[in-house]
Image (tube, rainbow, N blue to C red):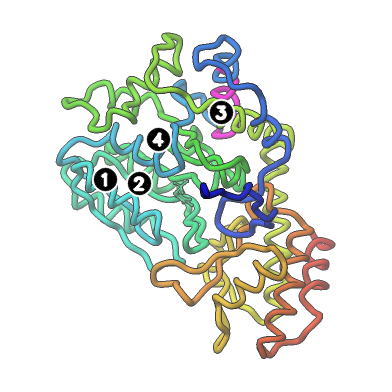
Amino acid sequence: MAETFPELKPAARILLGPGPCNVNPRVMKAMQSPVVGHLDPEFIKVMEDIKRMLRAVFRTSNEITFPVSGTGSAGMDAILANLIEDGDEVIVGVNGVFGTRIADSAERLGAKVIKVEAEWGRIIEPAQIEAALKGTHQPKLVAIVHAETSTGAHQSVEEISELAHRAGALMMLDTVTSLACVPVEIDKWKIDASYSCTQKGLSAPPGLAPTTFSTRAIETIRSRKTRCKSWYLDVGMIARYWGSDRVYHHTAPITMNYALYEALRVVLEEGLEARWARHRANAAALHAGLGAMGLKLAAQEGYRLPQLTTVEVPEGIDEAKVRAELLNGFDIEIAAGLGPLKGKVWRVGLIGESSQRSNVFLLLAALEQILAAMGYEFARGRALPSAEQSYVAA
Ligand SMILES: *Cc1c(COP(=O)(O)O)cnc(C)c1O
């Protein structure tokens, strides 16, 4: 007998990890729209509107602003592959998984990478970048991560961007977990290139990487001595499809672009300021509730992301078991620590659509039950009132 395969029936989880986060139902509905050709006038209208909405969300007037086909990491590779030529000096802030990833990618693309490191959970200090720049001859690029999802650290950007430009370098910023969660100001901060993703702050499924390039970055790409090492991610060629020429390069993922279109509409309807305020309020309540349970936050004080909280696992508690019980008993996903934080922290995301007051209370209530049953000693019944108090005080 021929093997049969069951119909897909994934559980509807509450996604409180580092992404993907929950998808707005309007986005899922948009994805059911008919697939049209990638050069259909109706799709071209969608592309034009996506570019305009992306500029609004990135707070930029950059002409070259479009979604790279692929997840956030494809956006990273697209920027690095187009800006870097063999032997270029690239300074990378490394204080977590995603800075490590940038350094790895830049090295593979032939850059001479200078890593500026900080302990995981802490930010990169501008003085460290300044010192690294002094040791270079002709720095091409300074790259940092705005929201380090592996640690919960919220990097300050403006001063580092200023230092990079003063040294003649371009500035790249990873906004994968920051866009539409906390302020991202591409033009004001003079960021030359940035990449994000669809499945975090924008709350669509994973699949596209919104990117933006300053005029200086585009001039740098145009004056390359060698061709971009990636055919698929060659921005010069892709820009001819996303620009007025409409020259076929690769087939745009039509349905994912519908998703991005609707996700951007949702974000702009809420308004960026309101969205940032929502993330702050829900994080403050979560932090108050966790604090009332005696749990400690792992990221550097004063630089904690509202959308991603790293929580220290208390002594004697099996961190994986807590996550399994949240998933099996409450349909809540949170994530484990990575690298040096593995086994030491949980990562709790309140990202985009998942940043809801109801999720804060549900998670705190579930954690109280699970931790009490595991013998963790704390004053029970205080977490929810503390969270409530935080909302009242705000
Ligand atoms: C998620 C993430 C990435 C990678 O994005 P993918 O969509 O998983 O490829 C890069 N940087 C940061 C800060 C992230 O959180």
Q: Distance between the residues labelled 1 and 4?
A: 14 Å
N-terminal label among 4 and 3: 4
Pointer 1 and pointer 4: residues touching (CB < 8 Å)?
Answer: no
Disc number lying in front (2 or 1): 1
Q: Which amino acid does label 1 sit on?
A: Ala
- Taking the spot 56% from the left edge, 62% from the top edge, the residue there is 304
- Taking the spot 48% from the left edge, 69% from the top edge, the residue there is 337
Range of residues picked out in magenta: 48-58
Q: How far apart are marks 4 and 3 (CA)?
A: 21 Å
User: Above or below — where is 206 with respect to 115?
Assistant: above
N-terminal label among 3 and 2: 2
Name the secondary structure under disc 4: strand
Mark linked to residue 257: 3
Q: Does the residue labelled 2 lie within 8 Å of ligand 1?
A: no
Q: Distance between the residues labelled 2 and 1?
A: 10 Å
Does residue 145 belong to the magenta stretch?
no
Pointer 3 and pointer 1: residues touching (CB < 8 Å)?
Answer: no
- Taking the spot 33% from the left edge, 21% from the top edge, the residue there is 236
Q: Name the residue under label 4.
A: 193
Pointer 2 and pointer 1: residues touching (CB < 8 Å)?
Answer: yes
Other residues around mark 4 within 10 Å, as few (<14) / some (14–19) / many (≥20):
many
Q: Mark 2 points at which residue?
A: 143
Q: Where is residue 238 in the image (x, y as percent from the top left)?
A: 38, 22
Q: How far apart are marks 2 and 4 (CA)?
A: 9 Å
- The secondary structure making up most of the magenta span is helix
* Direction front: furthest residue: 1
Q: Which amino acid does label 4 sit on?
A: Ala
N-terminal label among 1 and 4: 1
Q: Where is residue 21 in the image (x, y as percent from the top left)?
A: 62, 50
Q: What residue type is labelled 2?
A: Ala
